[in-house]
Image (cartoon, rainbow, N blue to C red):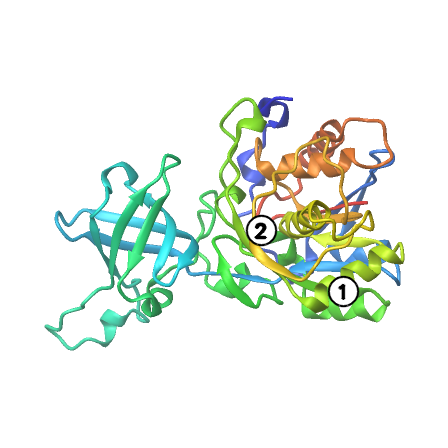
């Protein structure tokens, strides 16, 4: 297995720059794992593929305004930070530009966002803005910095929404990069499969008897960092904070014990569920029953073809970047079905069909259901 096995060519015009309205008006490519057969539908048609006793699991993480701008206190040089996750009060892991020049001890004065809502607009003429200070505590081999802020409470008011680098059009409604059920702030990127759901669609899903459960995984660096090594097993997966409540764990365990389908909305939900199942299995909690426990912590599960899924029976996802850990995860899930075909081959064939049919790709693009 090589990283280049998960490569494909995508015309740039198929990268969605803006979301469709309403949210559930996007297209839905349905792929059946038993045969690789594809069906072209609308996202609202998802209801036709659900059963009254299904359980759907959503990631309720909310995107932080995690992109910060500032300048070095010593030289005045411009700096950009992208917060990844919080290690302790006031201390964060972050990507930084220009990363190589930001060594231990460098202090950065953060600047407010531009525009009428900026704190600068409220200053009297001649007033001074006393910026929040960020100090570089450590530099890591993967380019990530550990940073300490002198006033963490003010960070949210200084940040901008961290849209992916392939989106070049500015957003006027930043809530459109949040799911309608987002609740727990902490992600550096949106769990994009959930962007297709409206409250009306969720109500319809519940109306046909489907049970809903919500977990949290704060999306981090590996969502948008491609695999560089040709051997994907050498790729270092970064940890991401997760939380599974007592109610969510109970709903998931009941579904598995009653042989009901668990449908994960997004690859982030998959990682939460499968990581928790691995932990439970290692600790002897489930005794072969695919059960999980109420838990919180740091998940670092890297799912490659050959993985055997303990919890997830169906997956709703978007179209993912070439050579990404997410494309590898979807290929692994396709391969875990009853078909004897390669999961990677089935998924790349589905992507080729989607490109031919002019589907919209990536964060604001169309959806895919793998059953």
Task: Say few, some or many: other residues with alpha carbon within 10 Å of mark 2 (under 14 / 14 to 19 / 20 or more).
Answer: many
**On the rendered structure, is 349 left or right of 138?**
right
Of marks 1 and 2, the one in the foreground: 1
**On the rendered structure, is 25 left or right of 192?**
right
Q: Residue 4, which numbered label?
A: none
Q: Position of residue 164 (x, y in %)?
A: 47, 47
Q: Nearer the viewer, residue 193 or 259?
A: 259
Residue 18 in view of the camera: no
- As drawn, 326 above or below 181: above
Q: CA distance from mark 1 to mark 2?
A: 33 Å
For label 1, the residue is: 250
Q: Position of residue 172 (x, y in %)?
A: 46, 63
For label 2, the residue is: 364
Q: Position of residue 305 (x, y in %)?
A: 70, 31
Q: Residue at x 27, y 36 (%)?
A: 100
Q: Residue at x 13, y 47 (%)?
A: 75
**On the rendered structure, is 323 left or right of 46?**
left
Which quadrant of the view contains residue 233?
top right
- Looking at the rendered structure, the secondary structure element under dot 2 is loop
Q: Nearer the viewer, residue 39 or 289?
A: 289
Q: Earlier in the sequence, mark 1 or mark 2?
A: 1
- Looking at the rendered structure, the secondary structure element under dot 1 is helix
Task: Say few, some or many: other residues with alpha carbon within 10 Å of mark 1 (under 14 / 14 to 19 / 20 or more).
Answer: some
């Amino acid at each position: 297995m090589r990283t280049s096995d998960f490569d494909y060519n995508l015309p740039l015009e198929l990268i969605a720059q803006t979301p469709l309205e309403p949210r559930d008006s996007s297209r839905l490519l349905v792929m059946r794992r038993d045969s690789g057969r594809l069906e072209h539908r609308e996202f609202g048609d998802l209801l036709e593929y659900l059963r009254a006793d299904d359980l759907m699991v959503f990631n309720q993480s909310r995107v932080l305004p995690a992109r910060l701008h500032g300048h070095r206190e010593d030289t005045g040089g411009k700096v950009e930070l992208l917060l990844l996750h919080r290690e302790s009060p006031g201390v964060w892991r972050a990507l930084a530009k220009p990363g190589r020049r930001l060594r231990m001890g460098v202090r950065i004065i953060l600047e407010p966002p531009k525009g009428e809502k900026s704190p600068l607009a409220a200053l009297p003429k001649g007033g001074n803005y006393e910026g929040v200070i960020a100090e570089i505590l450590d530099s890591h081999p993967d380019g990530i910095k550990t940073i300490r802020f002198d006033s963490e409470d003010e960070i949210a008011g200084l940040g901008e929404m961290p849209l992916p680098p392939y989106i070049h059009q500015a957003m006027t409604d930043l809530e459109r990069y949040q799911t309608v059920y987002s609740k727990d702030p902490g992600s550096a990127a949106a769990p994009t499969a959930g962007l297709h759901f409206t409250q009306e669609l969720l109500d319809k899903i519940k109306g046909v008897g489907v049970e809903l459960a919500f977990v949290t995984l704060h999306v981090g660096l590996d969502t948008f960092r491609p695999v560089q090594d040709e051997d994907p097993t050498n790729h270092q997966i970064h940890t991401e904070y997760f939380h599974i409540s007592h109610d969510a764990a109970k709903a998931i365990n009941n579904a598995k014990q009653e042989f009901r389908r668990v449908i994960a909305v997004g690859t982030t939900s998959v990682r939460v569920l499968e990581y928790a199942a691995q932990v439970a299995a290692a600790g002897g909690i489930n005794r072969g029953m695919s059960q999980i426990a109420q838990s919180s912590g740091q998940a670092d599960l890297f799912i490659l073809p050959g993985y055997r899924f303990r919890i997830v029976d169906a997956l709703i996802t978007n179209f993912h970047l070439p050579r990404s850990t997410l494309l590898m995860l979807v290929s692994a899930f396709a391969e875990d079905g009853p078909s004897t075909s390669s999961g990677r081959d089935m998924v790349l064939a589905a992507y080729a069909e989607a490109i031919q049919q002019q589907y919209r790709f990536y964060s604001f693009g169309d959806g895919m259901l793998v059953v």
